[in-house]
Amino acid sequence: MAQKMKAAVFVEPGRIVLDEKPLPDVGPLDALVKVTTTTICGTDVHILKGEYPVARGLTIGHEPVGVIEKLGSAVQGYAEGQRVIAGAITPSGTSSACLCGCHSQDGGPTGHGFKALGGWRFGNTIDGAQAEYILVPDAMANLAPIPDGLDDEQVLMCPDIMSTGFSGAESGAVKIGDTVAVFAQGPIGLCATAGARLMGATTIFGVETVPARMDIARRMGADHIVDFRAVDPVEEIMRLTDGRGVDVAIEALGTQATFEAALRVIRPGGTLSSLGVYSSDLRLPLDAFAAGLGDHTIRTTLCPGGKERMRRLMSVIASGRLDTRPLVTHRFALDDIEAAYDLFSHQRDGVLKVAITP
């Protein structure tokens, strides 16, 4: 009889429940990882609400930290019992997208009506991380050993939140001396703020209204906090930049309002770096878009994955240049994941990220 494991499974819109599933079979290039810590992402809430379609019966989650339980017969360079992470994006390393240098887009169409969701497989097209075990495909391209001395919560943001937030600053090509605005200081926006600071931005506006998030934004590198409930954020940022606007605006929420505001605060020739997952069509206002003549750059980003990306992010943590542990505000056992979803999806009790431990 096949061994069973506990897993958080998408049943239907509005229902993700804890269930039992068979332990996955390990193919030649795979690795079975015993999950020691994972979390819930905002994208998982889109799945829960039915705003992003996945197959019924799928295990959700894409932020795994764990220990190698079993290696595929062709996997070299790793050992069972080794502590590892895998990125939310799991490129094969051999696809056309990878060989073109766009690792995050390895994977092609998902069959859910979206044309370019690339290498995001965990909790999207294959079983994910909110379980006792996760099967990691293309293990030699994706497993990154955790440096000695780093605990699970120190590296928990690396698979997705930190990689995504940093990529907002990277796609925006933030330079030394830049002025940057980051719309929404949720976990991804906070990491975008930290990434912009590490890349050399010297003035960073964090747009937020929740006091606890404002405080963490300052710790992550925001120089000015713009409370969008107290002032019009576009007017305030333009006032504080003497009408110049910002070099880079990072949109980290996924709404028309924040996308449009980001477009309105960038200077002529500036960059809008979009990280949000949108659940409806976006409009480009004629004036903000300068009728197409503003030399604007609009960049969208799916967070980079793969073991080298994970190594780099963990080296940032190990160096002491960034501590993402303050983002973990709540902790739940996997047995209580339905309660964790209830808390996280309703954004109660000042939640930023929850750590889930099987």
Image: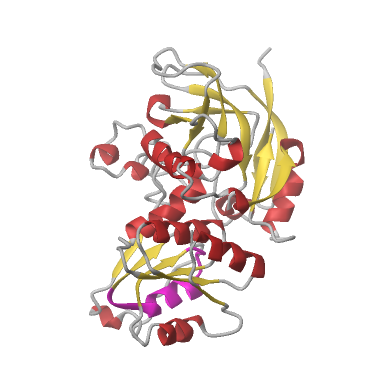
Colour scheme in use: secondary structure
Whether 85 is among the magenta residues is no
Q: Residue 116 in the image: x percent, y percent?
A: 37, 50
Q: Residue at x 24, y 37 (%)?
A: 99
Magenta segment range?
Answer: 252-269
Residue at far front of view: 320
Q: Quick one: quadrant of the C terminus?
A: top right
Judge by depth and name the residue closer to the eye, 342 or 349.
Answer: 349
Frontmost residue, 153 versus 92: 153
Magenta region includes residue 255: yes
Answer above or below: position of 113 versus 73: below
In the depicted structure, whether residue 18 falls above or below residue 239:
above
Image coordinates for residue 30, horizontal then vertical, percent: 46, 22
Look at the image and tell me in which quarter the N terminus lies: top right
Q: Position of residue 239 (x, y in %)?
A: 43, 87
**Residue lying at 67% horizontally and 17% vertically, measured from the top left:** 3
Q: Say left or right for 116 vs 323.
A: left
Q: Quadrant of residue 103?
A: top left
Residue at 63% over, 31% down: 36
